[in-house]
Image (tube, rainbow, N blue to C red):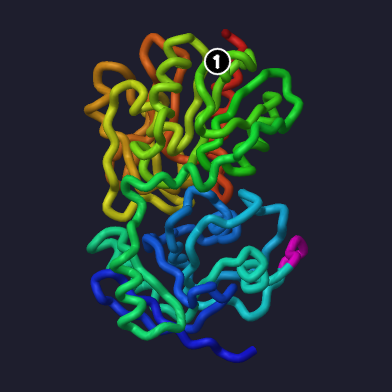
Amino acid sequence: MSVREGQLVLRDGSVFEGELIGAISPRGISSGEVVFHTGMTGYQEVISDPSYAGQIITFTTPHIGNYGTTQADNEAFRVHARGVIVREEARRHSNWRSDSSLDAYLQSMMVSGIGGIDTRRLTRVLRDTGAMAGAFGSADESTLLTAARNEVGTSGIKLVEQVTTQQPYVVGSGHYKVVAFDFGIKSTILRCLSEIATVTVVPASTTAEQVRLLAPDGVFLSNGPGDPEAVDGAPETIRDLVVGGVPVFGICLGHQLLSLALGGKTYKLPFGHHGANHPVRNLKTGSVEITSQNHNFCVDTNSLRDVADITHTNLNDMTNEGMKVRDARAFSVQYHPEAGPGPHDSRYLFDEFRQMMEAQ
């Protein structure tokens, strides 16, 4: 296969030379907010996670693609990420579950990528300056720089509208009835919920009254991409459901939206949390959970002081990772207890949701 030369240009003018992989972008340019992911495995689950809408994913692990890909590991039917950046794509893949190579997977999903990049240098730049818009492709440096500087990023952008389901659908056949808001829900989350409930997945714009007509035992608020303050109507709907007494469990963006529903505030982290190795302390038990995370925004702990008890804290930067609403059947975490990919330390949270519904 012939080498397709390309380059990555960041908004600050930083230039990285490499070779193009995956699909060829219709414009010859892929642009988005560049972030880095520190997980050593699970690249397919990361790429297919709808929470990466609007972003270009840099993998810090040097070799990507070693074990190939399989359709069973997709977190969504299509990829919403803007592209991928790797140091070296494995030329051969080897795994008994593998259906195809990473490059073939990217082409089938119409995702562009660039390899041969000095990802150590790139990660240092992003850690020092924060997540930054960038563009890559076969175009000249000036054209790519212009594309990077024209990129709008993720703050204030309605990315959930791009990833949410358009029609409700049902998965699982468990005992309880759960309504799951799809803000960008992952397949692994649905598998975990399906073990305890029959799950009706609904669009992000679903109203509280429409939820009540389904008579659920509990409501789940999913993960999703971007700025929680850009998800119109969701905090008001969630507030209505919490006040109504229905058990509510939120993950990631769902955690942020529940916080906004309570009157809390959110802010953007410099370079976000993206990886499968983040230590989180459970403040009730004192134990430390190794967690999978993917978010750029965070909840201001002080803004919840009068309405919720903080249950989990990130040990890397002491940011908020979980809460329990006072005088209500509602709790949430910032990280991913379903951990696709990642450790399973926090799967107990789905059982806590089940117990909350059982008590109800």
- The stretch of residues the image draws in magenta is 95-99
Q: Position of residue 182 (x, y in %)?
A: 55, 36
Q: Residues within 10 Å of mark 1 (few under 14, many from 20)?
A: some
Residue appearing at x 41%, y 67% in the figure = 31
Q: Position of residue 276 (x, y in %)?
A: 48, 51
Please give left or right for residue 236 compared with residue 131 in the image: right
Residue 243 can be seen, yes or no? yes
Quadrant assignment for the C terminus: top right
Q: Position of residue 349 (x, y in %)?
A: 53, 28
Quadrant assignment for the N terminus: bottom right
Residue appearing at x 34%, y 79% in the figure = 143
Residue appearing at x 34%, y 40% in the figure = 314
Element under disc 1: helix
152, above or below 140, in the image: above
Please give the count of numbered marks on the rendered protein.
1
Please give left or right for residue 311 compared with residue 28 in the image: left
Residue 124 can be seen, yes or no? no
Residue 43, quarter of the rendered image: bottom right
Query: Residue 352 lies in magenta, yes or no?
Result: no
Depth check: 290 or 273 in front? 273
Please give left or right for residue 301 compared with residue 288 in the image: left
Residue 234, quarter of the rendered image: top left
Q: What residue is disc 1 on?
A: 356
Depth check: 73 or 282 in front? 73
13, above or below 320, in the image: below
126, above or below 116, in the image: above
